[in-house]
């Protein structure tokens, strides 16, 4: 298709310099169509406008989102993990709990499986010139299940609740250093401004489904969410029984298209195997999240469909940079070079993963610099580095980790690989509570261990991964990595509004982390959801959410 410069010029007239720079990158071929759509959605450009621009640039429009609608009226039955605590939007932190929260409450925008942001309770958003203030326009006519209209006061109260350190909010891991209590401002009933601590080019993801606590609930909320489950979503609570399950019914007053299912039912399971048997036996229709190793029997089951999403969820292997034997970066690089990433992907993860390159920049991120060479297993080079570091005779060290997903098997593989370079690894595998402890330095096996493996869930942008586990003052810096050059680069990336500027910083970060190797990112695993044959329209996210409003049964 040829470029239509007349249309492009018309579109450019009403766009900001930042938006026009992105359009120029697409037209000139510096920015791919996929990256353009994703970054354009971040800047608040509507999906129809993005489609018009790609068409005018000769690259085709947006793919049709229309799907054959299934029959309405079904009851969709879901198996999930047991919520670990009382369901409260402020504090919920586990997959089972956030899945239930998300059935009734909604976000300003939704991070899709393609990392494209889509409007939800907000219709549009845009930054100021330097990304220190983001303005969101709210959808009109949205009603809470309790009857009142959702307005700016509710958004301000919901986000202030999460940004207030006094509330022990789980979302403080996202908002600390970005957005303070009182910095969310009402402009009018349908306009909200977020005044940030510093420029942030990826901020809309911080108030999207990517930040699973950031649902909008009434300003009047005082606690005891399980008594009301008040939200704006397409389903309303019918019954909730802690540790057992929940059911929901269609919200006939929903602001958008009414949900196809009449009811949804959620059954809580303590383990994966009973969920698999329930799916195979017809007692449930969906397993919300299926780990590869535990669910290997379903991968080739003809009665089951697997929805596979590319995610950036991963298991971080940290090496404590302020303690022997890992003070010398050559020893850290040697361990990284002993790991066979191809075997991790093909063997451990059954092909349902992508190789990691020892930085948070996964292949799925548009800002990842794909020109940085992939680290491969090289035992000879690893041995040379050990010799050069004065560790040629090897040493003994303990790897402390958690019993979760495939982490124990990953630890055993590492144990075998580092043996080839003279390292004797003792494994200390703990239950999750013992591993995380109080999750603060001095009171946590996770944060105090010399070497450990920690699970990190999916995020639509790498900001949290760049800051919490890697910056000198990072709250999750188990590697005790302190590097001023890194801190400067991470701050620069986080502040950048422009995709090409982000990519330039990303490349520098990737190279610095390959040199320093405080954390080994071996692989990024796919997010798997299993459904019975004939169940259609199910949309999971790699954050453990499950959108069921378009779900149906054959």
Image (cartoon, rainbow, N blue to C red):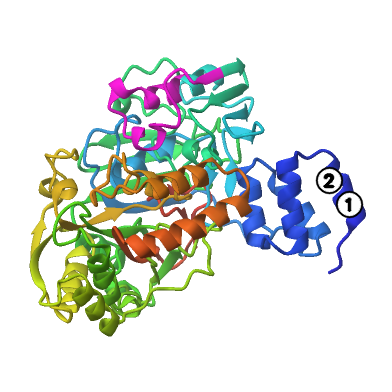
Residue 204, x across and y down, in percent: 54, 38
In the image, residue 172 sits, relative to residue 480, either above or below, namely: above
Badge 1 local density, few (<14 within 10 Å), some, or many (20+)?
some
Residue behind mark 1:
7
Q: Give the range drawn in magenta.
A: 157-185
Residue 425, x across and y down, in percent: 10, 69
Residue 544, x across and y down, in percent: 37, 50
Circles 1, 2 touching at the beta carbon (< 8 Å): yes
Per the image, is 177 magenta?
yes
Residue behind mark 2:
11
Q: In which quarter of the image is the N terminus?
A: bottom right
In the image, residue 469 sits, relative to residue 161, either above or below, namely: below
Q: Quadrant of residue 385?
A: bottom left
Estimate the spatial distance between the alpha carbons at disc 1 and disc 2, rounded to whole Å. 6 Å
Residue 133 seen:
yes
Q: Give the number of the disc on residue 453.
A: none
Q: In which quarter of the image is residue 488?
A: top left
Mark 2, secondary structure of its residue: helix
């Amino acid at each position: 298709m040829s470029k239509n410069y007349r249309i492009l010029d018309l579109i450019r007239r009403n766009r900001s310099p930042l938006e026009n720079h992105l359009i120029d990158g697409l037209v000139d071929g510096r920015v791919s169509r996929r990256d353009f759509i994703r970054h354009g959605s971040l800047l608040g450009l509507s999906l129809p406008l993005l489609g018009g621009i790609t068409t005018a640039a000769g690259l085709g429009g947006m793919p049709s989102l229309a799907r054959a609608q299934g029959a309405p009226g079904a009851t969709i039955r879901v198996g999930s993990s047991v919520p670990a605590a009382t369901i409260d939007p402020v504090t919920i932190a586990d997959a089972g709990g956030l899945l239930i929260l998300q059935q009734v409450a909604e976000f300003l925008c939704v991070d899709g499986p393609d990392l494209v942001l889509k409007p939800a309770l907000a219709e549009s958003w845009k930054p100021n010139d330097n990304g220190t203030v983001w303005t969101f326009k709210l959808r009109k006519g949205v009603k809470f299940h309790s009857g009142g209209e959702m307005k700016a006061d509710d958004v301000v109260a919901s986000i202030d609740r999460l940004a207030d350190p006094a509330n022990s909010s789980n979302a403080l891991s996202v908002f600390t250093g970005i957005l303070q209590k009182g910095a969310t401002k009402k402009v009018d009933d349908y306009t909200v401004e977020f005044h940030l601590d510093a420029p942030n080019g990826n901020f809309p993801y911080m108030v999207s489904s990517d930040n699973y606590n950031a649902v909008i609930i009434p300003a009047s909320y005082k606690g005891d969410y399980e008594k009301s489950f008040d939200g704006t979503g397409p389903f309303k609570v019918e019954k909730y029984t802690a540790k057992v399950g929940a059911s929901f019914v269609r919200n006939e007053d929903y602001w958008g298209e009414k949900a196809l299912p009449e009811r949804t039912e959620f059954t809580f399971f303590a383990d994966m195997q009973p969920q698999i048997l329930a799916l195979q036996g017809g007692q449930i229709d969906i397993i919300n999240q299926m780990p590869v190793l535990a669910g290997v029997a379903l991968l080739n089951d003809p009665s089951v469909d697997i929805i596979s999403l590319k995610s950036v969820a991963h298991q971080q292997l940290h090496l404590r940079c302020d303690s022997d034997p890992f003070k010398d970066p050559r020893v850290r690089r040697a361990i990284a070079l002993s790991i066979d990433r191809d075997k991790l992907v093909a063997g451990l993860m059954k092909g349902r993963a992508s190789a990691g390159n020892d930085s948070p920049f996964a292949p799925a991120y548009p800002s990842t610099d794909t020109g940085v060479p992939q680290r491969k297993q090289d035992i000879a080079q690893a041995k040379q580095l050990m010799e050069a570091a004065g560790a040629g005779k090897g040493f003994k060290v303990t790897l402390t980790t958690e019993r979760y997903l495939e982490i124990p098997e990953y630890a055993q593989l590492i144990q075998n690989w580092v043996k080839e370079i003279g390292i004797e690894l003792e494994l200390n595998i703990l239950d999750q509570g013992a591993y995380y402890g109080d999750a603060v330095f001095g009171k946590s096996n996770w944060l105090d261990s010399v070497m450990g493996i920690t699970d990190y869930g999916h995020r639509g942008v790498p900001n949290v991964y760049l800051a919490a586990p890697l910056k000198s003052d990072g709250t999750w810096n188990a590697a005790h990595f302190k590097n001023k050059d890194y801190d400067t680069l991470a701050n620069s990336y986080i502040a950048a509004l422009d995709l090409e500027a982000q990519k330039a910083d990303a490349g520098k970060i990737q190279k610095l982390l390959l040199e320093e190797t405080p954390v080994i990112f071996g692989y990024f695993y796919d997010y798997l959801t299993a459904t019975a044959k004939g169940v259609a329209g199910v949309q999971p996210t790699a954050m453990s959410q499950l959108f069921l409003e378009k779900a149906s049964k054959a």
